[in-house]
Amino acid sequence: MQVFDGHNDVLSRLWSAGGDPVARFSRLEGHINAPAAEAGGFAGGLFALYSPQVRRSFDFSNFKGGELPLSAAMEQAPALQSVMAEVGIAQRLQAAGLLRLCTDVAGIEEAMAAGRIAAVLHLEGAECIDPELLVLDALHALGLRSLGPVWSRPTIWGDGVPFGFGGDGDTGPGLTPDGKRLVARCAELGIVVDTSHLTMKGFWDIAGMGHPLLATHSNAWNVCRTTRNLTTTQLSAIGETGGMVGLNYATVFLSESGWSTGRATLDDCLRQLDALIEGAGEDHVGLGSDFDGAPLPQGMASCADLPALVAAMEAHGYGDTLIAKLCHGNWLAFLRRAWGR
């Protein structure tokens, strides 16, 4: 079964690690790499461009419960430097024949049929974009087709949610006037807008602007009550607007025990999938792993282990048609609707 996935951080990992990204991607390293992708049927997804405060990705691996406040705001210049470097890494991987950068569904389908990883550039947190939105236009020309206005830190566009347990995403204000201008320009350019990491008020701001609601890597709050997860009302709105939500494999967002211990199982993934399907509808749910950005459940060491998740879906009673929707069909249908082609 081919898997097209809503979110990963492999470009940020490769940039943070330094050295030759082609060599690193070609060997068994991290959650996503060429041999693991071939072994596990990882066919592509939204590849995040993320700006860490220092040259390393955010790391949940030693987190055991508690609460993490919002990270500090980030200046545009260092954010732009890391984002452009990650775009460069993606282009080098494409030149080496290890992936194909895609800007439409036809390109994704062609890459998948050819056995090439289909990569759509996604901006996770828009700190690198200037108030005049000129950088947005430039990134669009380089292939950007998906954008999350915030990560879990404040920006000129709006606030992200802190990482906490017990409360929902209603943690702060919504989009600023600049944030609404950013979302409007994304619509003009054909860039989908991601609500993951955004406050609940920001989520409803985007809904009020008439956009299909997208959460690339977010789970169900009624199964795991963290600020990063979505309430049943939010999930219902995602389905009603023709949107999409991707299951986040991060142990800390899968279950209460995952939050407190950092450990979770594939059964926890299935409980989340059940809740996401019940909330948004089976045509609006897919996978949004957070590979290379979060700790994974037992039985999932890398994308090479995706067949184990598919097998767990089968054992859980999901039929072939539903599994195909969850693994890639719903993502391609959503992107076709959202991009209008």
Image (cartoon, rainbow, N blue to C red):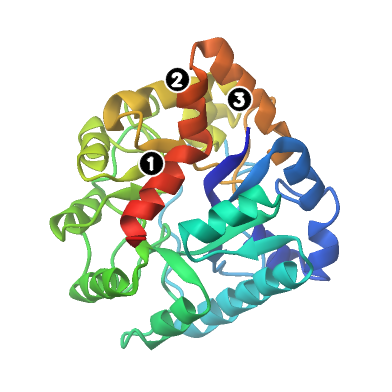
Question: Which residue is identified by label 2?
Answer: 271
Whole-angstrom CA distance, mark 1 to mark 3, is 18 Å
* x then y, percent, for residue 22: 81, 66
Residue drawn at the location 59% of the way across and 59% of the way down: 119
Residue 58 horizontal side relative to residue 184, left or right: right
Q: Local crowd at mark 2 within 10 Å, few (<14), some, or many (≥20)?
A: some
Residue drawn at the location 72% of the way across and 63% of the way down: 14
Q: Is mark 1 on a helix, strand or loop?
A: strand
Identify the mark at residue 1; answer none if there is no mark.
Answer: none
* x then y, percent, for residue 36: 77, 43
Q: Local crowd at mark 3 within 10 Å, few (<14), some, or many (≥20)?
A: many
| Residue 302 drawn above or below residue 87 | above
* x then y, percent, for residue 303: 69, 40
Mark 1 near mark 3, Cβ–Cβ under 8 Å? no
Quarter holding the C terminus?
Answer: bottom left
- Residue 288 or residue 200, whichever sits in front: 288
Residue 51 horizontal side relative to residue 96, left or right: left
- The three-letter amino acid code for the residue at tag 2 is Arg
Q: What element carries label 3?
A: helix
Question: Which residue is identified by label 3?
Answer: 310
Q: Is mark 2 on a helix, strand or loop?
A: helix
Q: Mark 2 or mark 3: which comes first in sequence?
A: 2
Residue drawn at the location 38% of the way across and 85% of the way down: 130
